[in-house]
Each structure stands twice: as C-alpha cells, then as structure tokens.
Amino acid sequence: MAERGISFSQRLKSALYDSLLAGIIAFALFSLLLGLRTQDSVTGLTLEPRPWLLVVAVGIVFFGRLLLNLFVWQVGHPVTAPFARLFTSEPFDRRDLMVLGGAVFLAALGLVVAAVLRVPAYALIAAGLLVFIGIGALRRALVRYFPNLPYAQIFVTVGILFAVFFPLTSYGLEKAFHLGLPLRYWFDLSILVLTYVMLGWGLNIVVGLAGLLDLGYVAFYAVGAYTFALLATHFGWSFWMCLPIAGAAAALWGVILGFPVLRLRGDYLAIVTLAFGEIIRIVLLNWTEVTNGPNGISSIPKPTFFGLPFAPFADSPTFSSFFGLKYDALHGIIFLYYVILALALLTNLVTLRLRRLPIGRAWEAMREDEIACRSLGINTTVTKLTAFATGALFGGLAGSFFATRQSFVSPESFTFIESAIILAIVVLGGMGSQLGVAIAAVVMIGGFEALRHTEGLQSFFGAGFDPALYRMLLFGIAMVGIMVWRPRGIIASRSPSIVLHEARPIPADLVEEGRA
C-alpha cells in the first residue's frame, strides 16, 4: 500500500529500481534455461541460442513487476481490488465499476484489433479477461439472488454427471452427425487427468490428512504397475485378478516404508521418502532378470468386459461381436475411461468415509499436533502405518491401471518428477481438500495439454514454443503464485470431519497455512 506523502516520481523511482533488480535476477535464472537449447547434430550436441525467447521472458518479468509496483503494491486503491471483489460479497464502489468497465472496453477493443491485424495473441488475452470477468459477474449474481443454494454440492454433482456422460454423449454425437471431433485425443487426455486425480487423492491421505510429507509416492505407483505387468505376462492373469493384488503389494510396501520413518518428521521424513522412491526405481532398472531392466515389460494385456476382449477378432467372442456392434477401437478407450473413473470415485468415497471414522480423525489429530495426539492415548505408530498403507494402496491401483493402459512399463515412467507433480497437485488444490485436488489435477494436467498447440502463445513466443516443454517451470510459477495469493490452496475452507449439531465450513482464515 502507498504511504502518505510519497509523490508519484518517488514511487516511479522505487518501482523502476525494484523492476530492474527483478529483471536481472530473471536474466540470471533464464539465461541457461530459456536462452540456450541443445541440438543433436552429426558432430554431437550443440548449443542453439534463443535470444528472443530470453528477451521476452525477462521483459515480462520487468514490465510485470513495474506494473505491479505502480498500480497494485504502492497505491492506496490497487487496480486488482475490483477483480478480487468479483469473487466476494463486498459491494463495489464507483472506482471499482470504472476499473471493470475499462477492462471490458479494453478487452473488446483487443478483440477488434486482433481481428483486424490477425494477431491471435491479442485475441487470447482479451478473451481470457472477458471470460474471467464474466465468471465473476455470474458468480456474484447467483450468490446475490440465490444466497442459500448449496453451491459446492451442485458443483460436485455437475462435475460427476459430466464425467459419467461425457464419453457416451460425445461418441453418440460424432456417430450421429459426423462432426469430426477429436474423440481419441479427448478420451486419452481425460484418462490421463483422471489418473492424476486418483494419484492426488491417494497422496492427499498421507500429506493432507495425516500431515506426512511424502516425496516418494511414485514408488507405490511403480510397485502396482510392475506387479500387474509381471503377473499378467508370466502367469497370464487378467487385469481384474491382478488389480487387488497390485494394490495389496503397494500397501505392503507402504507399511515397509512406514516402519523406518516412525520417528521422523518434516524435512527428514521427506528425505527418507525421496530416497525410497529412488531405491525402487534403481531396483527396477538393475534387476534385469525380473523387470527386464531399462527395456521394460511389453505386451501387457488390456482389461476385458466380463471376459469379452475389445479386439477386432479373437478365438473367443469379442465385445463387438457379442453385442452385434461394428468394431471400433474407441470402444476399448471408452471402457478404460470408465475403469479409471470408477477407481477414482472409489478412492474418493473411501477417503471421505475414512475421514469420519476414528482412524481418519486420528490422522487429522496427528497432523495438527503429534505430541498432543500421543498424549491422548492415540497409537501414532498404527496411525502412521495405516496412512502410508492406505495411500500406497490407491497408488498401486493407479499403477496397475497405468500398466494396462500403456501395455508397457519401464523405470523411466516412475521418476522423481512424477512424485513432484502429484505433490504439486495436492498442495495447489489445498491439502486435505478432495475437490481442490481434483480441480488442481484438471488445471495442471489438462491445462498444459490444452495449451500445447495454442496458436496465440506460439505467435507470442515463437512458432516452436511448446508449453509442455516448460511444464516444471510453469509448476514452479503456479506454486509461487498460490503461496503468495492463496497460501492454503485453491480450496482453502474445510468441512469438519465430525460435528455435534450443525456442520459449518471452516473459513480460510482459521485454517493454518500449509495445513488442512
């Protein structure tokens, strides 16, 4: 906020100094990350300079910091305040309405300029601003005229119904009207997002509910995948037979991990779990007699529908021949979609039920204060082991599905980056919040994939720009942004696990930062 008695020239001088310092730091950080790219040539690896990309990135940091200093951080009425009030119940004053009206006018002008000059970047920015203001205005109108509606329940119900009917509806529309929809791409992306939703909910038990920082969650994912792959390829067992075995094997390894870390907390626990994840990956990489080493395991069978395979032909009746349908490869993809949807919903249902049981309340008590939890007679050993085992169980189930979905597994699929992505989803969504984790998974996984071939971004950063290549950089930026503006995650409020008379949501200001 601006201090009284400070002139605009003084604020401008301070803002320029701060922005210049931020630009120098950005140049030092991005000079190697964005300014150079390795190219594989005949003579070996060479470095290709990308000065314009580096200039754009540093320019964004410099001018962004300058605008924030001049119009947000060092002024009495920040220009961002009206946009924040769109998502609250605070009344607008005259300046708020002027700022919002000016923003709508500039966005409309941007769309016109983009159409005339054929610059997709302007259209992308203007459309994003209009959509943001529109969503905020719609939200305020709904809350004003329908204040007592259960919006959270409505949002969850609509989301579940959309997830259930999306594949069948889109497939039916394509077959009926031949719209040319990229159904295979949509279904593959939806399966990927649901897999990370399930992994996020599984890790949320360990991190969000029990308060145990686990950086090696991908190890249980790998155990489930390799358990199914080995049983299916060596013994010919089906997916449905191996699924509970894979989950039980991962849960067993969760207990094995839990015993050595019973007395560890915080950073020390994180280091041990990180080492556990790397140990599992290295074992898979070097135990070639069993895991086939870096070559991985291929020809993993797909799941069947009550014994009916999704294949064009087979020795036994297939799904299409049994139901008198023309064979379509999308049938198997849609079936996989519903398998992972059912597994994700099962994970969510079990987690919600466990939270209301004594073991779930023991997890939350241990998260808040382990010493007080122990003094109340709660067995923290059993509490920790059950948290690790339950989270690992769902990780193993997701790993088993991953193996059958890909028909191939290798150690390269289970690196630390996967653990970091899953943990980022849990933290960004709000630790302990099931809905927040689901939203974060959709945004972080589906959002980056949706931006992969965005014409506006490519026209702004260059034809060769691919946001997927900078996924971890975008993860870091998102994490910093969440820590600054919403330190408790996207869904900051919490619902109490047990109530005496009436359940009231716990507001964000009463939820300790970084805790559920």
Image: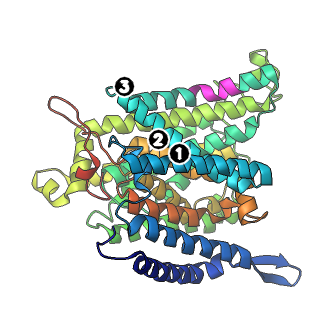
Dominant secondary structure of the residues highlighted in magenta in the image:
helix
Q: Which residue, given by chain and number where applicable, does mark 3 sit on?
A: 146
Which residue is at the front of the view, 262 or 163? 163
Residue sitting at x 34%, y 71%: 267
Q: Earlier in the sequence, mark 3 or mark 1?
A: 1
The segment highlighted magenta reads 164-170
Q: Which mark is residue 390?
A: none
400 lies above or below 468: above
**Dot 3: within a 10 Å radius of its alpha carbon, few (fewer than 14), some, or many (20 or more) residues?**
few
Q: Secondary structure at mark 3?
A: loop
Which kind of residue does numbered mark 1 sit on? Phe
Residue sitting at x 49%, y 44%: 439
53 lies above or below 510: below
Q: Secondary structure at mark 2?
A: helix
Residue sitting at x 49%, y 64%: 277
Q: Which residue, given by chain and number where applicable, does mark 1 sit on?
A: 132
Q: Which residue, given by chain and number where applicable, does mark 2 sit on?
A: 136
Which kind of residue does numbered mark 3 sit on? Phe
Residues tagged 2 and 1 counted as in contact (Cβ below 8 A): yes
Whether residue 486 appears in magenta in the rendering, the answer is no
Q: Earlier in the sequence, mark 3 or mark 2?
A: 2
Describe residue 348's horizontal placement relative to residue 228 as left or right.
Answer: left
Marks 3 and 1 sit apart, C-alpha to C-alpha, by 21 Å
Residue 283 visible (yes or no): yes
Q: Position of residue 434 (x, y in %)?
A: 40, 42
Describe residue 154's horizontal placement relative to residue 27 as left or right.
Answer: left
Scheme of colours in the image: rainbow
Marks 3 and 2 sit apart, C-alpha to C-alpha, by 15 Å
